[in-house]
Image (cartoon, rainbow, N blue to C red):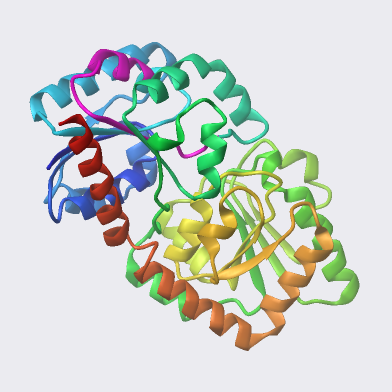
Amino acid sequence: MRIALIATHHSDYAANLARALAMDHEVMLVLSRRSAARQIEPEALSLLRRSVRVEIVPHHYAPLQPLVARLCQWHIARFRPDIVHVQEHPTRSMGLLARHLGSKLPLVTTVHDPKPHSGGDSEAADAFAHFYEELRGRSDGLIVHGQALIGMLAQTGVPRSKIRSIMHGVLRFGHQQANAAAASSIHAHRLIFFGRVEAYKGLDTLLAANVIWRREGVPIKLLIAGTGPDLDRHRDAMRMPNITLMQSRIPQDALAGLVGGSLAAILPYHDATQSGVIASAFGAGRPVIATDVGALAEAVGDAGLIVPPQDPEALAEAGRAIVENEGLRQQLERAVAARVEGPLGWDAIAAETAVFYRELLSDRA
């Protein structure tokens, strides 16, 4: 097959999928300049170009969104694919592209968040609701990252028959050697909370659990790494001797070391659909503690601990177990490795995706 992957957002996801698909198919990957620069290291992009035709378009600033759509259409026309696969995100670009393509080619859309996160993401989704509706309506097939999300997307009016669950693969940021070096120097009591800090990510629940750890003498060290609008309202609660705050956009290689050098990543989310943080933690070889929201439990499987959302006591107990039970940690680490090599590996995900493409092409025929 000739496959056109359009990813003006979610560049890391699309690049991994493109590389795996290119083992058996001809693939073109269209990336936006800023997203690619932030999520794909130059060495990795250079390596990707050996097997995938990579095209770069401008970042999707609001005035440029119609231009981005037209440029994507132009690259598609030159490549002459059998199928087009785009990543949904809150702009007009992909909705406009779907309109330009019409029904000429089978169109697949990955819907990363069938229900937007509360807060800023929800406001953005409302602003671009018409373009979401157009993109989904014109798509022959839609991919979500978990069985739990099929019903969520169907509630928006998309026929269930169009939806396929294919999991989000692991994200290996930094070089594998850096990840291995981090794994050999793990901080004995450290948990890491990383990424963009929005209210839905549950920093308030994490800090409430930290009060319990300190009261009960659990020797946990918390590393909070990232930026976002929810940091300021919790600044006083983070002034604890066992909390280190790294408030910045952290380079990929440095973040790889921070995650790989922690016992586990912790995701106390109030609401979510799926999470690139889980994919990144697994890519660094680390288990996770996550809340039972959206498809997080399905992504984690037996490679982490699942607790109810907004439950500081349960979160505190899971953190204690990770720090104090070496046998449990080793069991979870083995489970992470199994998921990375199995259902969350990109070869398996590319194979599932290619089967979906063929089904859609057969339906068209």
Name the residue located 35 percent from the left edge and 14 percent from the top edge: 64
As drawn, 39 above or below 221? above
Quadrant where the C terminus is found in the figure? top left
Numbered disc total: 0
Would residue 4 be seen by someone viewing this image from the given angle?
no
Q: Residue at x 78, y 46 (%)?
A: 235
User: Can I make out residue 243 in this image?
Assistant: yes
Q: Residue 111 location in percent, x, y?
A: 44, 36
Q: Residue at x 19, y 33 (%)?
A: 83
What residue do we see at 86% from left, 66% from top? 212
Assess whether residue 138 is covered by the magenta stretch.
Answer: no
Residue 252 in the image, given as x and y percentages of width and height: 42, 54
The boundaries of the magenta stretch are: 95-114
* Quadrant in the picture for residue 222: bottom right
Q: Is residue 161 above or below residue 75?
A: below
Q: Closest to the observer: 116 or 75?
A: 116
> Residue 209 at x, y = what percent?
81, 61
Say if 9 sits above or below 136 in the image: below
In the image, taking residue 337 as reference, residue 73 lies left or right, namely left
Q: Is residue 182 above or below residue 78?
A: below
Can you give x and y, in whole percent of width and height, for residue 99 in the image?
Answer: 31, 14
The single residue placed furthest to the bottom in the displayed view is 327
Side (left or right) of 316 relative to 186: right
The picture quadrant where one finds residue 302 is bottom right
Which quarter of the figure is the N terminus placed in?
top left
